[in-house]
């Protein structure tokens, strides 16, 4: 994987991360407030699920 692909992937992450607050700022605030109510174990679980989903997607694509 060359550095251009890495920068392209990072740019795509920024675009996707910015879509929800741009389209629905109030909904994004509500979702963020709900996330702040989760305990550390729940946050770690969702983080682990995200890492595993991303790793599986990378594995399938390569």
Image (tube, rainbow, N blue to C red):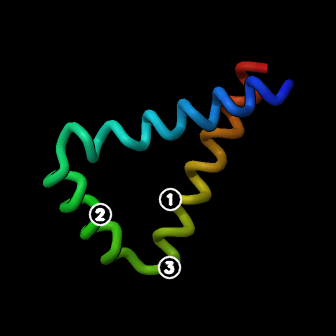
Say which label, 1 or 3, has the lower sequence index: 3
* Residue in the picture at 21% in, 37% down: 23
Examine the rendered structure and indicate whether residue 35 appears above or below residue 3: below
- Where disc 2 sits, the SS reads helix
Classify mark 3: residues with Cα within 10 Å, few (<14), some (14-19) or many (20+).
few
Distance from Cα at disc 3 to Cα at disc 2: 15 Å
* x and y, in percent, of residue 2 in the image: 85, 25
Query: Image check: 29 left or right of 52?
Result: left
Please name which of the two marks, 3 or 2, marks the residue nearer to the observer.
2
Q: Residue 5: which quarter of the image?
A: top right
Classify mark 2: residues with Cα within 10 Å, few (<14), some (14-19) or many (20+).
few
Mark 3 and mark 2 residues within 8 Å of each other at the beta carbon: no
* x and y, in percent, of residue 31 in the image: 25, 59
Which mark is on residue 32? 2
Please name which of the two marks, 2 or 1, marks the residue nearer to the observer.
2
Q: 20 or 62, which is in the foreground?
A: 20
């Amino acid at each position: 994987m060359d550095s251009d692909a890495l920068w392209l992937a990072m740019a795509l992450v920024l675009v996707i991360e910015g879509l929800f607050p741009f389209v629905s700022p109030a909904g994004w605030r509500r979702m963020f407030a709900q996330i702040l109510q989760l305990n550390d174990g729940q946050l770690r679980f969702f983080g682990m699920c995200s890492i595993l989903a991303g790793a599986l997607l990378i594995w399938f694509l390569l």
